[in-house]
Image (cartoon, rainbow, N blue to C red):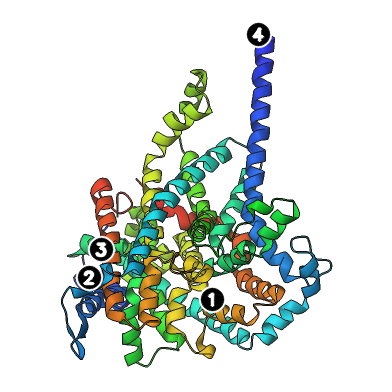
Amino acid sequence: MKHSREYKYKVSRALYRVLNHTVLILLSISAIIPLYFLISTSFKSREDFFFNKFGVPEDFYFSNYLEAFRGGDNFFRWLLNSTLVTLIAGLLALLCIVLASYAFVYFRFKGRNFLFNLTVSLMVFPPVVIIIPLFVFMQKLNLTNNIISVIIIYVGLMLPVGIYLISSFFSTIPREILESAFIDGCDVFKVLLKILLPISKPAIVTVVVVNALFTWNELLIALVFLNSNESRTLMAGLMSFKARYNTNLPITMAGLTIISIPIIALYFFGSKYFIKGLTSGSLKG
Amino acid sequence: MLYRRKIMPYALLIPAFIFLILTFFYPVINLFQLAMFGKKGDGYGFTGINNIKILFGDSVYITALKNNMLMLLIVVPLLIIISLVIAVLLFEKLAGWKFYRFVLFLPYILAIPVAGIVFQYLFQQNGVLNFLLKSIGLESLALNWLGSPKYAMFTIMFIIIWKEVGLGIVIFLARLMSVDETLYEASEIDGANWLQRLLHVTVPQLAAQIQFYFIFSMITILSWVFNYVYVITAGGPGHSTYIMELYIYYNTFKFGLPHIASMASIILLAIVSVLIFIQYKVRGGLIGSEA
């Protein structure tokens, strides 16, 4: 009797596992179907796509990619703009984030808690709310259709999350490490550069990754502030690119794949930084 | 150790606050001025809160509000339930759980405009989904997913869930991995089944994360769904998929009504602020105990 009960238990465990895997495999498939469709279509010729909507490409037809670069007249320019915006805004934001977090965590001053809470609560600010005043503002400064406008706004939008992440990390570093350096005669900036930053490498990589993801993928601000063809980023250019190739789906998909490659590549190499960065707000408390 | 310098901390905050003032504080103050102005007689002038009346008299704005509320009611609970169940499935020490997590989180990092355009081609009337449905004889299921006012909003909601659910999964999974295992062993000895374990062990242990994700998803639905709607339906067919963000954008840049849009912005900001205020009261902080 005992034997058969154990046996039954084992069988039900095994069945449960099979069921569990089946559900997860189905979910995984539905998670990547659109991605599969995107990439497989980008390698199909027009005829191939006409007869074969969902299967694998008959043979790899690379000219869609050439056409996307060549035909989307400003595609290279958009790529350059997106890269510049991501790099410059990312660097500026990181500088501001590190300095501000240093002040919030290691200094005692009037208004510290208030300013910190104020900054962090801006994390949930709806970005659409700022576009009207800022559009008028940027127009006055003659900065619309210039990537400087979106760089400034992106830096501002990235600060609350970044300051929150880096401050939380700073406050987990044991104070003794800093104290001994301080006694050794390091000044305020030396402590930051020689001690805090090297320890904080993982948190900083996380913030850099989260920021790059945000800037590269951002559409609304880019759409509002970059209207001329030469000033657009990839996301803002995408809409006109799509309208242009509306009848040639494989070329549209090739363009979309090119845009997504940097992010997907980053994710393949550092998925743990993405997962950590995008979830770390939730694990406290 | 805390430095006691008088000027240094403020100096360190200056770069950040230059950008914060420019992107957040200045626009909000300016918004209140803009919202109080409007058409007056022949030109423009101070109209007080008259723009609120105009807003609530505009059926398109009401549609937008209703759609945001509909999404809050449908998308937020579904996101929580689906990601919770998947996280629990992944947690059962299954071979390959890291691979599943990697794949299931992938949609979350994809750009919304990219995902939006791909789904648009999948869900069009003569798109790939309907083509596949027809080819296996399910003609009656080949609906006009995006072109009919009846289904378009629900199709967008499906796409939002597809894209956003990965975040919930990894949040819940990360917390589950630190839950005391004896709790599960005890419940197993007591003969609790899968559902009982989920409701009586897992959910209480995850209460803080569920609450966080609940607020986070509500904020997402209120202030971060512009990209989806703009790319997939642009508010159509008719005005059936309008949302508050799109209303603000179109009224400013398409219809030239920035004063009305400013008032709509203030209302959106007010709704989000109320949510945040509740969160502060309930948890004593935005996210938990803060620095």
Residue under label 2, please give it. B52
Pinpoint the chain carrying mark 2.
B
Please give the name of the residue rendered at 33% of the width and 64% of the height, measured from the top-left corner. Answer: B62
Pinpoint the chain carrying mark 1.
A
Residue under label 1, please give it. A235
Residue under label 3, please give it. B270
Corner quadrant of residue A89: bottom left
Packing grade of label 2 (10 A; few <14, some 14-19, many >=20) is some
From this view, report whether residue B157 is shown above or below residue A90: above
Packing grade of label 4 (10 A; few <14, some 14-19, many >=20) is few
- Residue A2: mark: 4
User: Share a chain, discs 1 and 3?
Assistant: no
- Residue B266: mark: none
Q: Where is residue B76 in the image (x, y as percent from the top left)?
A: 42, 50
Viewer-nearest of labels 1 and 3?
Answer: 3
Viewer-nearest of labels 2 and 4?
Answer: 2
Q: Which comes sooner in the sequence, label 4 or label 1?
A: 4
